[in-house]
Image (cartoon, helix red, strand yellow):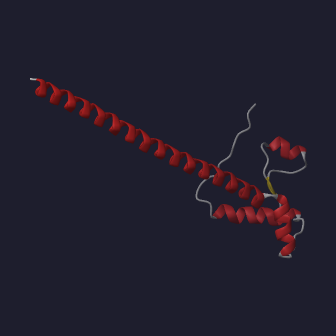
């Protein structure tokens, strides 16, 4: 009887110990996974900041000026015939001395030719009052 009781207690203690060890190893494995994911997240966050900085630098007026100067682009102020004014309302355009749309003879011709190739009516926003 004593041997049977000893074996049962030993088996129970061994089973409990194995369950405890399995839980501890899975806990350690999960902590390593969490640490690896945190490192990946940190690297991605840093990369995101670097990429946003690069985008801001590429869009900066200073960089555009350097590029234009380096490539010797010839830039000039457009003439009235090449100017198309987009206004939020007819009143604002007329207050500034322009009619909305193309300005000048060639601008109107260009707008007429462009309207021939349009598939449907242009989208127009109506001003809020």
Q: Position of residue 119 (x, y in %)?
A: 58, 59
Q: Of 44 and 92, which appears nearest the observer?
A: 44
Q: Residue furthest front?
A: 2
Name the residue rendered at 65%, 51% in the picture: 46
The percent coordinates of residue 93 (x first, y second) are 84, 46
- Name the residue: 83% across, 76% down: 71
Residue drawn where x is 85% and y is 74% of the image: 70
Q: Position of residue 103 (x, y in %)?
A: 83, 58
Placement of the N terminus among the 4 image quadrants: top left
Q: Position of residue 81 (x, y in %)?
A: 85, 64
- List the single residue furthest toward the bottom: 72
Asked if residue 128 lies left or right of residue 26, the reply is right
Residue 107 is drawn in which quadrant?
bottom right
Q: Is residue 104 visible?
A: no
Residue drawn at (87%, 65%) of the image:
78
Above or below — where is 17 with respect to 58? above
């Amino acid at each position: 009887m004593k041997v049977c009781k000893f074996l049962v207690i030993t088996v129970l203690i061994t089973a409990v110990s194995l369950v405890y060890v399995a839980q501890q190893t899975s806990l350690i494995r999960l902590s390593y996974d969490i640490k690896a994911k945190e490192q990946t997240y940190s690297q991605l966050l840093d990369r995101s900041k670097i990429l946003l900085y690069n985008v801001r630098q590429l869009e900066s007026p200073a960089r555009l000026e350097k590029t234009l100067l380096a490539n010797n682009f010839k830039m000039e102020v457009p003439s009235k015939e090449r100017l198309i004014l987009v206004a939020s309302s007819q009143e604002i355009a007329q207050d500034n001395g322009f009619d909305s749309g193309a300005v000048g003879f060639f601008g109107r011709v260009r707008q007429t030719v462009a309207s021939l190739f349009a598939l449907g009516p242009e989208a127009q926003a109506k001003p809020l009052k």
